[in-house]
Image (cartoon, rainbow, N blue to C red):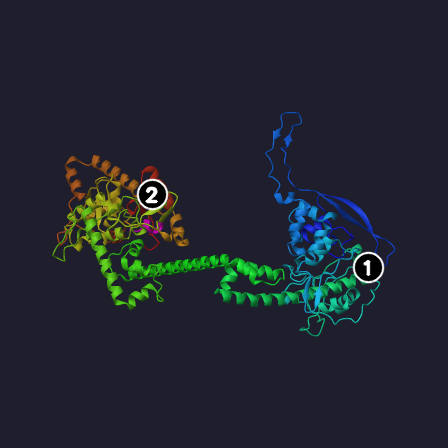
Amino acid sequence: MNPSSPAPSELTLASTLDGRDVTNDVDNSPVKAEPGETSVPVQGSGEPVTTTVVTEAVDSSPPNKKTRLETKDGDQGVEVPNAPKTPGFLKLPLELLSDILIRAGSPEYLLAVARTCKSLCHTLLSRDAEFIWREARQSPSIVYQHEITTCKLPDPPAEFFSEAAYAAFVFSSGKCDVCSQETSVPYSSFAIRVRLCKKKDCNMPGYEPSPHLVPRSNTPASTVTELTTHRSPMGAHLREILPTSEVSNLKNPGLAPPNPVGYDLCRSSSLAATELEWELNRNKPSYHVLCVQLAKWRNARIAHYHKNKAANEKLGRNIASKYGWDYKEALTATSFGVYHSRQNRLMEAMHELDIQILKDQVEDELLSHVERVERRKTERTLMTNRKDVETLYRQLRSKGGSKFMPSLSTFRQLPVIAMLQSAESSASASVAQTLSSNEVMQKLLDTQLKKWTEKAMQDLGYTLGFPKNWKNASKNILHPVERVTARFLCKKCQRVDVKYRDDESLDFAGACLHECGIGNTKKGRVHRGRRNVWESSKFVKDDKATKVLQKCVEGLNFPEDKDAGNYILSTGIAVVCTSCNPAMVIDTRNIIGHSHRHDNMQVKFETLQTVENYLGPHPYEYGVCKTLLGPSNATPTTKAEIDRKNYGCRHCLREEQEKQAALAAAAAPTDAAPDAHAADGHGAPMDVDGNAKIDLGSVVSRLQEVGIAGPKEQPPPLFSFNGMRSHLKAKHAIVYIRDEDIFCYEPFNLAT
């Protein structure tokens, strides 16, 4: 509240609600108040100053009756539901309300209550409530014994303030005049209403105190008063309106000389002509005496606050030591701290009798605090250990120490790992360091991993149709789950990891690492469950992939039970799928995924000439779809390759080849038909080992050497990669695009 408030005895509603001076904010008009004019005589001036005063506030309590709305035509109105009931605190009679507010302990708390709503503001600003403000000024935090002097807040002069306005002037918070940040610090100068926060940068360098008050100069009423860094206007202005103690209060003895040029001293503020004239006419002895008294009271109050706080601190430590409490814990986590801060805030002394009343409650709160701290410590230990276990798991997988590793969730369930990652295990070293330094723990881990792998082999071998306790003395014979024909599907989630996305099924290593996904697959919200338990019963045999792999191994004369059978998945051998119509050339590395398109896929190993005829002028490109559909498709180079119209449909190409072959066969003589059929080469070429295998890489090189591969003058219909996917789905009912479905008209620019 502003001491220069135009009204001598009334506090405007707007100024009380927001703590600002109405005369400094010309746009802040009172809300829901009846304006009136009053003339305030000014000492030393023949003419009174006319100001607008808010004399009545409107009660904002909601109505208790239903409001009935009627239309212009007199139709039936609409009933509005009952408004919320008025809080009981607003219905208290003034006698009870005054008893509560007087016990609050300070006028600043009355200000906070008055600013909560218009109803309380109207009640506390009425003349009947003046006694509440007077009694609040007699609280221990306002009237106190400092050294040998009793300090009390001076009574407000009736010509300047009402009780409520005086409380707002002394205790209201506001913005710092240097940094504009909100602060609860009162005015640094009550005379000119300058407020400075506690920041060092905002401390104002002052001026030497004047021995007496200099009479004000004849300043024109139309000029603008500015608080600047220049000595002459600021110094003159200070000495015109400030008492000696107020000037010295703005002095910072640590900065010399006073008034350095270029220092941002204070805000720049402009006052209207009427306000300026009012300020300059407030140079009265009574106002100066009030400012001096307020400054002395404030300084003594600050000193008394720190003295009382130090005494409470000493007594609090002694009481905590007497009862065996940890002082910091009691201060921060119990009602003892609430009581301690309240006594400091109200500048009242602590009493041991009050602590004795709170003793049982404080001890219960301390026990709860200790339990909470231990629980949080346990949780942090558990989180740290789990993170260390995950790091160890990644290290074991990257080193390849064990050929088959379980999933991370299953790895955590191993007895030795479960013990190391438990909350009770609070070793100073990490889990990995503990295992590396403790040979016994390392051997235990290796043994448990080996036992888990053997158990998984037995269970999944039984799923493939072999005896559960299958054993063989020869080390050259692979276990059934390690063979190339061992493929599995998860019957619970029907999903595979990224590594097996092209195959759409899992080998034994993939089955061991598999974790079922939880969530909506269509919306891409699949995540691994934390309580996911690995069970061999969740897996079934992938019959389609197993059958076609057995046919390939038999066709190439590879032993199924030896490691040589895995050769077909590491080298691209040309195989023809006769289940497709027309027949398609496939790389054996893609045959597992392709097998899921047919119920019983039939394959055949053809001659080199037949493979070249099927491929035509466009060689087989392995890994194109995997590259363009993989995680690297977000790079600019990959995006450019996806958008390039470079992809043709091999199904359409094969249909055109079949159509041309049928026309050629119809036009050829009858006796030449067997030769043409023989030219198709349905007999597989045999190498020196007796195996019929054609490396697709050699086919590509051969097509390029003879000049068959490469762009032609009349290219076939070409699409972008996404356009090719749409074409396959719409015309050929193929949802998942694969390498055998497309060809690249120009060389593929990315590494596969």
Res. 337 visible in picture: yes
User: Could you tell me which secondary element the residue under label 2 belongs to?
Assistant: loop
690 with respect to 283 (left or right)? left
Circle 2 or circle 1, nearest the eye:
1
The residue located at (12%, 54%) in the rendering is 472
Question: In the orientation shown, which residue stands out farthest toward the right?
Answer: 46
Q: Mark 2 points at which residue?
A: 716
Badge number at residue 594: none
Total marks drawn?
2
Instruction: Find the magenta span and give its range.
Output: 621-629
Residue 622 lies in the magenta stretch: yes
Question: Residue 479, position in %: x, y?
Answer: 17, 53
Query: Which residue is more in the foreground, 272 or 443?
Result: 443
Q: In which quarter of the image is residue 214?
A: bottom right
Type of secondary structure dominating the magenta stretch: helix
Q: Which of marks 2 and 1 is nearer the N terminus?
A: 1
The alpha-carbon separation of the residues under discs 2 and 1 comes to 98 Å
Q: Can residue 202 be seen in this view?
A: no
190 or 744, nearer to the observer: 190
Considering only vertical position in the picture, is 752 above or below 88? below
Report if residue 367 lies within the magenta region.
Answer: no
Instruction: Tell whether 232 sits left or right of 357.
Output: right
x and y percent of residue 377 in the render? 41, 60
Tell me which amino acid carries mark 2: Pro
Residue at (29% x, 67% y) in the render: 436
Q: What element carries label 1?
A: loop
Q: Disc 1 residue type?
A: Asn
In the image, 9 versus 128, the foreground residue is 128
Looking at the rendered image, the quarter that the C terminus falls into is: bottom left
Q: Where is residue 618 in the image (x, y as percent from the top left)?
A: 29, 48
Please tell me the numbered disc located at residue 281.
1
Quarter occupied by residue 441:
bottom left
